[in-house]
Amino acid sequence: MTTVIDTTGLDADRRSAWLELAGDSNIPAYAVVFDTALETCLERNAAREHPRPQTVIKKQHRALSLVRAQLADEGFEEVLGVGPVRVAAPLVAESATGSAVSELPNHTFGLILSRFDWGESPLGETLLEVARRAEDAGFRDLWLMDHFRQIPSVGRAWEDIPEPFVALSAIAGQTRSIRLGCLVSSVTHRHPAVLGNQLATLDVVSGGRAVCGLGIGWDREEHDNYGIEFPPTPVRYEMLEETIDFLRVIWGKGGKPFEGEHYRAAALAGYPRPIQDPIPILVGGSGEKRTLRLVAAKADAANVFGKPDRVAHKVKVLHQHCEELDRDADEIEVTHLVNALAAPDSSTLRELVDAVRPSGTSFEQFSGRHNAALAEDLLELFSAYDRAGADHSIVSIPGVATLGTIESFAEVIDGMR
């Protein structure tokens, strides 16, 4: 027995990192709490070869009680206790039911590019070609992740992951209408003056198509590896709020001062001015007490995680915050992340899946994990998200560089208009 109380989950920063990692990977995050009685913990501790002081065990047990009370508001899909094993069914297109798609309002789509394992294809040329294909297929926006290395849930650390603002500027020159942004930029990565200038420049070179995606960050190891400070979670929330305020000022008129707890400036004057007034700001995260309230107070869009019923709950919480803050909820766009691969018929679906699925993963396993289905079935899935209150779906398409993957999804986009 190496431990009596595993304190890993008691660390708020680690929990935040796991939630953000799940969001980046388009999967739900669950919290499992083992409600072992204090007396049992003390007995187990006494049986160890080198027991810890009882005061330490009691302190850890009290901390667990406090943490459990917070978990429901942190954005986990569900908080589970000890009980019978329950297997969660994968979110597949066929499981979504409801009213006809024709009755739904206009639902739009974005494409996120997170993995660039494109074999012998040149990274730069393929990236631009994928962006052009996405625009032609009807995607409203295109998103890149903002990391210094590939994240573990997506690929290997040594795989290519382009600097997003350089890549988006290149894409801007090869496209006409698709909007461009990061999902999302951690406020720890750049001073807001640098970020504001990057986004304003992207907005100018794209003709007014930039979107600002922000988050508090989660990858402590990435920060440590690159020598970037990673403050505690409450501090990063403060930095996020101040960054939004800072950007609103630097994109505005005149040279105004800014005085915050983390950022100060004598005269904020940003040039070039963005074409949009202002650039829309999306905040990523599902935390109900801080993140969604911050969206209601200051942001233009929220990116939330989970299945349709979970999204519906988050939308309800967001609307409650809007009501309390006297904000029109219709001003805020609700977006969500999801994996999907569409095909017009069964034979094409089989060809696409076989072309992109890893060896050792069956057709059925891959299809269930990535929502690979006929376009008509995916319409039911996205109808469920629309009814849940999501206005916009940001889709990760496996094997996106493979010809036909983006083009087949156009039928879904057209069907939701």
Image (cartoon, grey):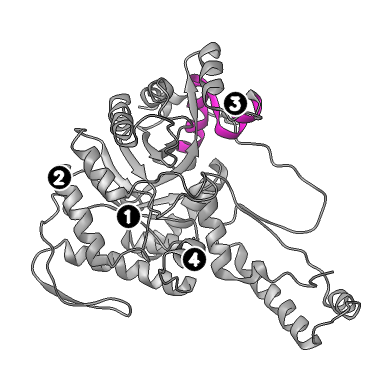
Residue at left 8%, top 68%? 254
Closer to us: mark 1 or mark 4? 4
Instruction: Identify which residue, 266 or 149, lies in the foreground.
Output: 149
Q: Which mark is residue 328?
A: 1
Query: Looking at the image, is 221 positioned above or below residue 202?
Result: below
Give the image location of residue 327, x and y in percent. Answer: 33, 59
Closer to us: mark 3 or mark 2? 2
Residue that numbered label 3 is attached to: 94
Magenta-drawn stretch, dominant element (helix, strand or loop)? helix
Residue that numbered label 2 is attached to: 205
Tag 2 or tag 4, which sits nearer the N-term?
2
Q: Which mark is residue 289?
A: 4
Tag 4 or tag 1, which sits nearer the N-term?
4
Residue 190 visible in rendering: yes
Three-letter code, disc 1: Asp
Secondary structure under badge 4?
A: loop
